[in-house]
Structure formats: structure tokens, C-alpha cells
Amino acid sequence: MDYFSLNHKAPKVSFKEAVIRGLAPDKGLYYPSELTPLPPSFFENIEALDTISIAFEVIKQFVGLDIPETDLKGILTDVLSFDFPLVEVEENVMALELYHGPTLAFKDVGARFMARCLGYFNRDKSAVEPVTVLVATSGDTGGAVASGFYEVEGVDVVILYPSGKVSDIQEKQLTTLGKNIVAMEVAGTFDDCQAMVKKAFLDEDFLGKRQLTSANSINVARWLPQMFYYFFAYKELKSQGKDIVFSVPSGNYGNICAGMMAQRLGLPVRHFVTGTNANDVVPNYLKTATYTPKPSVATISNAMDVGAPSNFVRIQQLFDNDFDALRQQLSGYSYSDEETRAALLKLYSEDHYIADPHGAIGYLALKEYMKGVGNTMGVFLETAHPVKFIDVIPKDISEVIKIPPAIQSILTKTKKAEKISTYSELKKQLLTN
């Protein structure tokens, strides 16, 4: 499998090269050169397949020959070591809980898969120079990457996060590990962090000194494994014989892009819905056909505080930049913090379900789309454990949330983070450490 840059001004590369580079030299995101739909027999027999077998069939064409079959299955067995339960919330409305991994966030799968791929490529130290993973986070990415790459030999990790704009628990997850994990607290927004990361990738002063790559969803090894969730859900819901709609709370749009990629591989999905907060670039685009990034706004659903979603260009590529074709498969809605809190309270008091702010927005968007739509099973993605947002969830709910052992163990640890304000400060840190 080859990957090309969506800016079309860089050579094609292998999966291995795309993972190590992260971003193409022309600033473009890598995208697979071809997509081969899975055979009908795969979907006919999916109930008989276990999690690892499903994931292997889904991902193998994207990895190609860079990781042999036995090793790839071993990586998947290690990565997919926890559950992805579907929970009935209302009639024909399910929550797909993606927070049962080590850092209680959906990003555990992608971060762990990428870490193990890099570890595999690094097994022969003479063939691959040490890699520095440089990543921006608006919340959960940082903790998932820190955990996934912790003590991975030959890989250093530098995480940039916006000061005061991640929850206390999220900050603890990414600032307390130490060893090969370094956190940098940026005076600015997530967009500022992401801009610094992209600038570093293209800075020629790092050539021969640091091999930089990204663990954000711009990296193909972080983005593509997110397809697995949708196949797992389909396996559980297939026997009900209803059309499936997925509602995905979206910030950088990697997760929903992976779902739409799964649909392109043949997964039977009726429609995708994106729910977001005040950072409503994509819902506005779906209304106006005009894509206008803007500065991000801080909300209680902080993982979606993204004003310039990196992965949306991949979604456009999936539809050959045909706006009308895209709009037939994707609807988008945005919600205020007040509407999000009201949804959290409604889910708790009426449905006896505790959601996090992102899941609550996914629920609202799903319900909006499903008005008047028949014979449909709606699935909204619960992307992080509610405990991570205990400081913004209504008190009636936060008081009954039990703190998992994985969180309790880090609450007393000491935060360690370098404070920076400019790209030049980041560059100095990278070149001197």
C-alpha cells in the first residue's frame, strides 16, 4: 500500500514511511492510494469472527508488507485488550462506549497501535534512527499517547497542550509519567499547539538532528485503527435488521473520518452525524458549502475545541471533493454548553445513563437527525469516561461518579511540564534536549 500527500506535491511513500514521517514534506496529510472493499462474505460471517480477526481483515491492506501477518496480529492482540460495549440508552438508541482502555478514552486504540508499529519498525536500531513523537492535544490525545508510548524503546514523546484548557485529570495523565514522556504547557489554544507541531515537521533545522513524527490523528497509524469501532458495533447490531446511523462527537474529525472510511470498505451504514460545540466549522460548511476555519472557542467539551480540523480534508477526499455527495452521507449539528448540560441531566434523570459532555453532544446530534427517520438504530459514541470531566459535569451527576483506580493512582502525582509561549521556545527545547 502506498500513501500520497493530499497536497499532491510529495512522493508516494509506504505505510512505514508514512507512520515515521507523520506529515508529508509538502505539508499534506497522507492518504491511501487505493481502497479495496472487503468481500461480501466478510460481512455475512462477521458474527463468527472475534475482535482480532475483524481488525486484521480491516487493517491489513493499509499496512501492506511492512509488518508481516503474524506480527500484525500480535500487535492487534496487544492493542485490543479491552472491551467496546454497546449500551442501550433508549429504544433504538445505543451508546458505544470507547473509554474502557488504559487512559479511559477512545484514543487508546490509535495511540497503542501507532506505538507498537513504531516499536516494531525500531526493532532494528541500525535501520531506523530514534524518533521523537511530537503531538498536540486538546484533552484526551495527550494521555493516550503518553500511555501508549511510555517506555517504548527508541521513541521520545513531546506533548503540547493549551494551558488551562484541559481538565485536571487529563492534565495529570499527560504530565506525570516522566521518562520518555515530556509535556509542554502552551500559553494559547489547541490551534496554537497544532500550528507549532506542523511548523516543526517542516523545519529543516531538525534534519539530521531529530526525526519528528506526529501521534495526532494526522498520522495514518493513529487515524486508521479507529475504523475498528464501527465494525465491532455492526457485528453486535447486525441481527436486528435495522439501518445503522453513527453519531460521532468531532473535534479534529479523525474518528468520524475513520468511520466513513469503514463505510467505503463496505460497512453497511445508513448515515453519519457529526455533533460539535461552539466550534462549528463543519456544521456551517454542510449548510453553506463554504469551509471557513476560525479561532477555537473554549467549551466544557474541550476535546472538540478545534477551529481548524485537520482531518476534514480526508473526508473531502473520500468523496472526491464532491460537496453534494458528501452531504448525502454526513449531517452536522452544534450545541452550546447550556444545551450540553441539559442533555447530561436528561440522560441521567430519564435514561439513567451517565455520559460525558462529548457523548452528550453526540446524543443530541443523533436525536436531531433521527426525527422522522424510521427503521433505524442510532449509535452515539461515548469517547471518554465521564470522570475526566467531573469539574464541568452538573453536580447532581458528578457526585455519583466513581473514580476508577487508574485515575485514583495519578491524582497524588506531581505535574511536570515546561511552559512555553512561542514556536522558538519549542524549537530550542527540541534541539537542546
Image (cartoon, grey):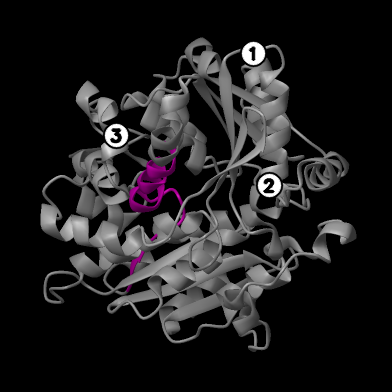
Three-letter amino acid code at the position of disc 1: Val
Counting residues from the start of the chain, the first of labels 2 and 3 encountered is 3
Q: What segment is highlighted magenta in the picture? A: 210-230
Question: Dot 3: few (<14), some (14–19), or many (≥20) neighbours within 10 Å?
Answer: some
In depth, the one of 355 and 313 nearer the eye is: 355
**Residue picked out by circle 1:** 373
Does 209 appear in magenta? no
Q: Position of residue 388 (x, y in %)?
A: 68, 64
Tag 3 secondary structure: helix
Q: Position of residue 213 (x, y in %)?
A: 36, 61
Marks 3/1: CA–CA distance: 27 Å
Picture quadrant of residue 8:
top left
Does 211 appear in magenta? yes
Kindly identify the residue that appears in the image at 12 percent across and 57 percent down: 70
Query: In the image, which is nearer the foreground, mark 3 or mark 1?
Result: 3
**Residue picked out by circle 2:** 358
Query: In the image, which is nearer the foreground, mark 2 or mark 1?
Result: 1
In the rendered structure, find residue 10 and report the number of the disc placed on it.
none
Marks 2/1: CA–CA distance: 23 Å
In depth, the one of 287 and 146 nearer the eye is: 146
Picture quadrant of residue 319:
top left
Marks 2/3: CA–CA distance: 29 Å
Is residue 316 left or right of 355 when viewed as pictured? Answer: left
Counting residues from the start of the chain, the first of labels 2 and 1 encountered is 2
**Residue picked out by circle 3:** 46
The mark total stands at 3
Kindly identify the residue that appears in the image at 74 percent across and 40 percent down: 277
Three-letter amino acid code at the position of disc 2: His
